[in-house]
Image: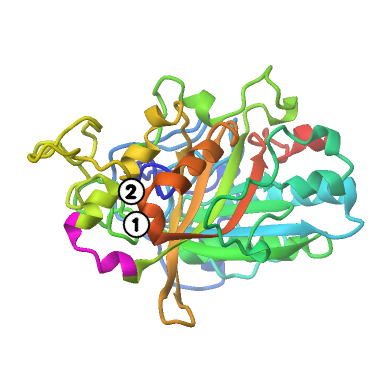
Amino acid sequence: MESSTDLTGGAVGHDGTAGSPGGGLTRRALLGTAGAGLVVGAGAGAATALAVDRPGARRAAAPAGGLGPARVPFHGEHQGGILEPQQARVQLAAFDLAAGAGRDGLRTLLRRWSRTADRMAAGEPADEFENQVALDAGPCSLTVTFGFGTGLFDKTGLADRRPAGLEPLPAFPADALDPARGDGDLFVQIGADDALVAVHALRVLQRQAAGTAALRWQMSGFARTPGATAAPMTGRNLMGQIDGTNNPRPGEEGFGSKVFVAAGGEQPDWLTGGSFLVFRRIRMLLDNWEALPVDRQERVIGRRKSDGAPLGAPDGAGERAPVDLAAQAPDGSLAIPSDAHVRVAAPAANGGAAMLRRGFSYHDGLLADGSPDAGLLFLAFQADPRKGFTPVQRKLARGDGLSRFLRHEASGVYAVPPGAPQGGYVGQGLLG
């Protein structure tokens, strides 16, 4: 889908290098010293259509046959988990600072978390509160991304350094938000190609935060596992739609200005090279959606379900075919209906607003009425939510036919600092 439910930036590749920087003890090596006989296959799987590299990231190809050794360095210009290929699993969590933690407590915690995330991203055991859950795994493309909520700045005496635009989103029609499952002072996104690696990282960080920050909410999500398809292709969401075709792509003109905060603007210097993240938990009304015949589903979205091509495109055009909003059906009507998602969400219809969407599906069983508690953990990185998410969502809420099949149930906006310098920590520019 084009905006409010877009999952990925298209098909992306996974590759990496084995071992750990500096010759440190890896989790696999530690397990070996304990006499365990498990072996993880070498290499990274599934080369796909778009590989995204962070400056300075080591992503040398490894022999095919396994995802375990693939790794993304923690330190860099931008935090990991934004530009890298989307992993198969995600753990999302938000924490609230404890009363009296203050600026010093936050600084100590971020130093601790950054040091630990660096070790885990290299496949090394955590230096504190290691629980042995992931000892037999490599890093599996682990990334840990940190964000700051609006309340953090008041609690630490830094209200004067809060970025412009870091404020609760406006109310949208039909929102059904649960405050207990949104917002939070500190946001953490943990991605990995192995569920245990992601869960291990969250548990370690949670224990390290004890006394300084308490878990506010936590959610788990998933995407397609690399290598699951015979050929590279964009993933599908729980509605069965190819999801993420129109994401902005690195290398395109203006990509950086859409995603990252530039120097010299209205934002504080400490956020230069960082981003803003909008999170939404969006439940899909799957029973209602699946009751529609496929041709009706296609008209709601504006794309063919089989190959993702826009309606009106010739056979074989594929998902990358340009969307022709003027195309007509044989009866003279618009091929893409006036309330189709692709029409309402098109950047051309929203002043060029764009976001880098990196969402994950979730399925948490059944609700009391027997309907699936399932949908999308929507994540969108952008340079300014006031010019990205907010105007687009306003328009979608008013005129998008897809909205009838969605419920927005949780929400949050976070300032995502730039990457940590070598030897430094995330948020260092703010806290010193």
Percent of width and height locating residue 279: 56, 50
Choose top left, top right, bottom left or bottom right for residue 273.
Answer: top right
Q: Name the residue under label 2.
A: 243
Horizontally, residue 342 falls left or right of residue 406, namely: left
Question: Viewer-proximal residue, 172 or 257?
Answer: 172
The number of numbered badges drawn on the structure is 2
Percent of width and height locating residue 140: 46, 54
Horizontally, residue 94 falls left or right of residue 256, namely: right
Question: Viewer-proximal residue, 47 or 65?
Answer: 47
Q: Mark 1 points at which residue?
A: 237
Residue drawn at (23%, 40%) of the image: 336
Percent of width and height locating residue 93: 63, 59
Does the magenta portion include 294?
yes
Look at the numbered discs 1 and 2 and tell me whether their residues touch, using CB distance below 8 Å: yes
Q: Is residue 231 visible?
A: yes
> Which amino acid type is marked by label 1?
Asn
> Which amino acid type is marked by label 2?
Asp
Horizontally, residue 343 falls left or right of residue 197, namely: left
Q: Say above or below: 250 vs 10.
A: above
Q: Which of the marked residues, 1 or 2, is nearer the chain's N terminus?
A: 1
Quadrant of image for the C terminus: top right
Residue drawn at (54%, 66%) of the image: 134
Secondary structure mostly seen in magenta is helix
Horizontally, residue 421 falls left or right of residue 191, namely: right
Q: What stretch is highlighted in magenta?
A: 288-295
Question: Viewer-proximal residue, 177 or 418?
Answer: 177
Choose top left, top right, bottom left or bottom right for residue 383.
Answer: top right
